[in-house]
Image (cartoon, rainbow, N blue to C red):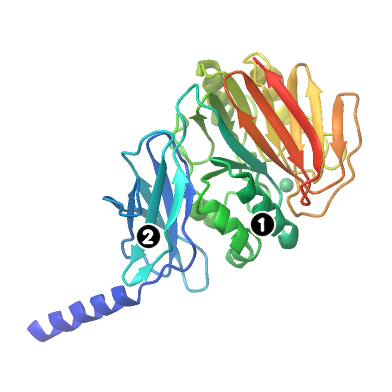
């Protein structure tokens, strides 16, 4: 019996020693005092993340939940919540599992109200990995504090497709230092791998399906157009309550499918209904979306409906509608500078040519 116990214990230690982190850890759901580190491993044994204001760390957190992917040899995405952070501060972190240790990386927590910050947006990278690599490098160079992604991060829900198209080296470099939020697209779908690879903020929605968060003076409502959003659905009611309650200076709605769009997939009746019933009465400043693979700024009854889609996916031809202010047939991503007084946006192509710029003042 004693021998058997020793053998089991030995095998356990051996398995732990062999346990491995299989991908660069990345960041999600940042707040002023916390962030999630997502660490994909080839097993479910606990991951430890050391963190602190210097590479000496001083703080430690462990796996909160490990979610299985559909990889042939199952992998587990460990979600580790770092807490007790200071707002607008830079933190270092490093993950370990057994003998496997990730590289040291650093990120910034969300700034306090009244403090300016920079964020980036991209959507629909999918199969265009060469363009996406370039755009990822450009986003790193823009030095944002946070990133918003508009979905269709890969062309299908399959594990191998996620790895080949979204989790490429240049994107992982960005995501290891800039926490991102994603609005689920129709291609990755709201499926097992998407749920495993994403950790959305806990918010008033009490679900991972859709959510909202604050960052500095900005309030962001992130819709999931893969989950019903017609009037009367839980998502519609959450969106309504959420935008009625926020007192933040700036209000942005992000979703994969745009309300107003001309060319490509065109308008979406459900999002138009949401716009009229929720976004307009609550004075939303911008609706950010992708899905149609071009750039288009549509100004409808005071709200900028921006289609900033294709950080790699095959381009569509935009067709200007009466509400279209500007448009471009090109790959694109956007950089936003947010302060209490102004919301500035610049849209670039993959070669950093400026496609459009916009400034809204309060
Ligand atoms: Fe799409």
Camera sees residue 224: no
Front residue of 16 and 242: 16
Report x, y in % for residue 163. 59, 64
The disc placed on residue 95 is 2
The disc placed on residue 104 is none
Report x, y in % for residue 290. 73, 41
As helix, strand or loop, the secondary structure at mark 1 comes to loop
Q: CA distance from mark 1 to mark 2?
A: 26 Å
Residue 273: image quadrant is top right
- Residue sitting at 73 percent across and 35 percent down? 346
Report x, y in % for residue 112. 45, 27
- Residue sitting at 79 percent across and 21 percent down? 300
Q: Is mark 1 within 8 Å of ligand 1?
A: no
Task: Please name which of the two marks, 1 or 2, marks the residue nearer to the observer.
Answer: 2
Q: Quadrant of the N terminus?
A: bottom left
Front residue of 67 and 221: 221
Count up the numbered dots.
2
As helix, strand or loop, the secondary structure at mark 2 comes to strand
Name the residue carrying label 1.
154
Residue 344: image quadrant is top right
Residue 328: image quadrant is top right
Instruction: Describe residue 259's horizontal placement relative to residue 73 as left or right.
Output: right
Front residue of 150 and 229: 150
Camera sees residue 231: yes
Q: Is mark 2 within 8 Å of ligand 1?
A: no
Query: Of label 1 and label 2, which has the lower sequence position?
Result: 2
- Residue sitting at 80 percent across and 46 percent down? 293
Instruction: Describe residue 113's horizontal placement relative to residue 357 as left or right.
Output: left
Which residue is most to the left?
2
Instruction: Describe residue 333's horizontal placement relative to residue 246 as left or right.
Output: right
Which residue is most to the bottom?
3
Disc 2: CA contacts within 10 A as few (<14), some (14-19) or many (>=20): many
């Amino acid at each position: 019996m004693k021998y058997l116990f020793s053998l089991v214990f030995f095998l356990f230690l051996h398995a732990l020693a062999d346990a491995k982190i299989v991908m660069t850890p990345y960041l999600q759901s940042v707040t002023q005092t916390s962030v999630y580190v997502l660490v994909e491993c080839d097993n479910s044994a606990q991951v430890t993340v050391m963190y602190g204001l210097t590479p000496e760390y001083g703080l430690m957190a462990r796996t909160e939940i490990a979610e299985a992917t559909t990889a042939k040899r199952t992998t587990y995405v460990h979600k580790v919540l770092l807490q007790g952070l200071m707002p607008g501060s830079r933190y270092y972190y490093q993950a370990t599992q057994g003998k496997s240790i990730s590289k040291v990386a650093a990120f910034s927590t969300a700034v306090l109200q009244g403090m300016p910050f920079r964020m980036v947006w991209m959507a629909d990278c999918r199969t265009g990995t060469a363009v996406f690599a370039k755009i990822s490098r450009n986003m790193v160079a823009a030095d944002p504090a946070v990133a918003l992604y508009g979905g269709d991060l890969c062309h299908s829900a399959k594990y191998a497709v996620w790895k080949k198209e979204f989790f490429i080296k240049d994107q992982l470099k960005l995501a290891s230092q800039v926490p991102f939020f994603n609005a689920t697209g129709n291609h990755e779908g709201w499926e097992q791998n998407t749920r495993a690879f994403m950790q959305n903020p806990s918010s008033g929605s009490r679900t991972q399906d859709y959510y909202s968060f604050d960052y500095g003076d900005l309030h962001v409502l992130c819709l999931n157009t893969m989950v019903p959003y017609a009037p009367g659905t839980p998502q519609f009611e959450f969106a309504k309550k959420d935008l009625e309650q926020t007192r933040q200076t700036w209000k942005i709605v992000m979703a994969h499918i745009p309300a107003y769009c001309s060319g490509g997939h065109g308008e979406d009746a459900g999002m138009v209904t949401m716009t009229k019933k929720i976004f307009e009465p609550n004075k939303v400043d911008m609706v950010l979306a992708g899905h149609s693979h071009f750039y288009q700024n549509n100004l409808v009854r005071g709200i900028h409906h921006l289609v900033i889609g294709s950080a790699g996916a095959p381009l569509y031809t935009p067709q200007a509608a009466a509400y279209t202010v500007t448009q471009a047939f090109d790959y694109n991503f956007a950089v936003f500078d947010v302060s209490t007084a102004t919301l500035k946006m610049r849209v670039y192509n993959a070669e950093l040519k400026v496609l459009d710029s916009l400034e809204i003042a309060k």
